[in-house]
């Protein structure tokens, strides 16, 4: 995870993202459905990527680790 991703995540979570909770369910960290949409749009803009519809699943947003893995793939890393 890079600094930009962590900063974006922390603007949408009620609990600050850190190394100890990156695999924790994002719902447990305070991400609700509206925040998920806002988060998605902010990530797409920051990284100049578009999430395909098939990746808009509960699993994608299950943890910051999962979400970062997908962002990395979409960025071509």
Image (cartoon, grey):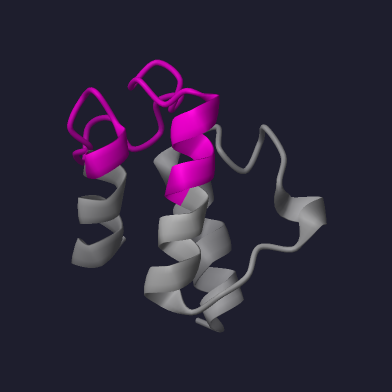
* Magenta segment includes 16: yes
Q: Residue 44: x percent and y percent?
A: 50, 66
> Is the magenta region chiefly helix, strand or loop?
loop
Name which residue lies at 19% across and 39% down: 18
Picture quadrant where residue 43 is located: bottom left
Name which residue lies at 43% across and 47% down: 39
Q: Residue 60: x percent and y percent?
A: 62, 43
* Magenta segment includes 6: no
Does residue 27 show up? yes
Q: Is residue 52 above or below residue 26?
A: below
Q: Is residue 55 left or right of residue 46?
A: right
The quarter in which the N terminus is drawn is bottom left
Q: Residue 68: x percent and y percent?
A: 45, 56
Q: Nearer the viewer, residue 19 or 61?
A: 61
Stretch in magenta: 11-39
Does residue 2 show up? no
Q: Residue 54: x percent and y percent?
A: 82, 53
Name which residue lies at 55% across and 27% down: 33
Q: Residue furthest top?
A: 28
Name which residue lies at 24% across and 65% down: 4
Q: Is residue 68 above or below residue 13?
A: below
Q: Count the labels in the image.
A: 0
Q: Residue furthest right?
A: 54
Q: Residue furthest bottom?
A: 76
Q: Is residue 77 left or right of residue 59?
A: left
Q: Nearer the viewer, residue 49 or 59?
A: 49
Q: Nearer the viewer, residue 65 or 57?
A: 57
């Amino acid at each position: 995870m890079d600094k930009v991703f962590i900063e974006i995540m922390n603007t949408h979570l009620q609990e600050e993202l850190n190394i100890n909770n990156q695999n924790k369910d994002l719902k447990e960290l305070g991400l609700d459905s509206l925040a998920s949409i806002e988060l998605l749009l902010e990530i797409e803009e920051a990284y100049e990527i578009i999430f395909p519809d098939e990746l808009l699943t509960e699993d994608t947003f299950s943890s910051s680790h999962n979400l970062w893995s997908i962002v990395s793939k979409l960025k071509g890393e």
